[in-house]
Amino acid sequence: MTLALNEQRHRVRDLWIHLLCVSLSCFVLIVGMNEAGHVWAEESATSESSKDSILIEDFGNPGERGFPKGWGAQRSVVTAHETYMIQEEEGVSFLRAQNASQRVYTKQMAWDPKTHPVLVWRWRLQSVPEGEEFIAAVYPSLDTDMMFIPVNTKYVWSATLPVGSIKEGGMFSSTEIVIRSGPEPVGEWVEERVNVYKDFLEIHNHEPAALAWGISLLGGAAIEIDFGSLRVEAQ
């Protein structure tokens, strides 16, 4: 009887050990799958973001007197520092242009207009005098000519000209395309999405450079306007 009781105890012990091993194996497998799935999801989101959207500028790096680092002036650096200045609201940075008389530009970028043809930016009108026509413009430069002069397109916010208005450029001037019209809204951010690669082909009848040359911004002479982040996206 004692022998039979011991054998029964051994069988119960072996059964518990077996069940415990099975439970631990299932637990390890489930945890491993969850961890692997979590990492995969993060990597997919990261690669998708970097693949489909490239941030060009978020104005989070102010230099002297609030002028953005890595940017230059069309003519006078001193005047540019007086009329363009980085501001911040609720943790979001932007470039404010006030009574500007020249463009500011950056060449600190590396994006292929063929793979990322859509330029996206935000701007916010703060004030515009009555009767003023030009409000602001963004100039993506996708190439340079034989004299290394930027070849660009001027996308305009006009107070009076209708959307779709086009003014052909010359040897030393850019083709202008009105993409927003009217002196409103004031104090509200609005977003623009433009296929700059498509426009470049239609205007210049040739492919742009492998990498874009730069971007310029211009606020009107009597205007106060904010430029938000700039990025390019795959179509």
Image: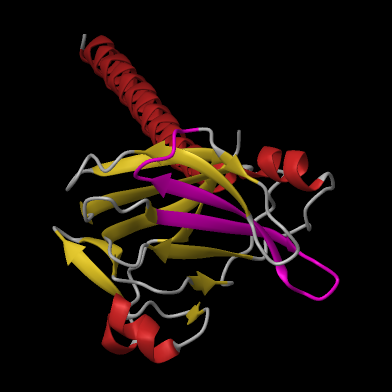
Magenta-highlighted stretch: main secondary structure?
strand
Please say if 88 is above or below 187.
below
Q: Position of residue 213 (x, y in %)?
A: 67, 65
Instruction: Please state, as top left, top right, bottom left or bottom right, where the N terminus lies in the image.
Output: top left
Please say if 116 is above or below 109.
above
**Residue located 45% across and 74% down the image:** 102
Camera-nearest residue between 121 and 56: 121
**Image colouring:** secondary structure
Q: Is residue 200 magenta?
A: no
**Residue located 51% across and 71% down the image:** 105
What are the residue bounds of the magenta stretch?
136-163
Instruction: Please state, as top left, top right, bottom left or bottom right, where the C terminus lies in the image.
Output: top right
**Residue located 86% across and 71% down the image:** 146
Q: Position of residue 38 (x, y in %)?
A: 40, 36
- Residue 53 appears in the picture as rendered: no
Q: Position of residue 58 (x, y in %)?
A: 37, 61
Q: Quadrant of residue 41?
A: top left
Please say if 23 is above or below 57.
above
Q: Is residue 147 magenta?
A: yes
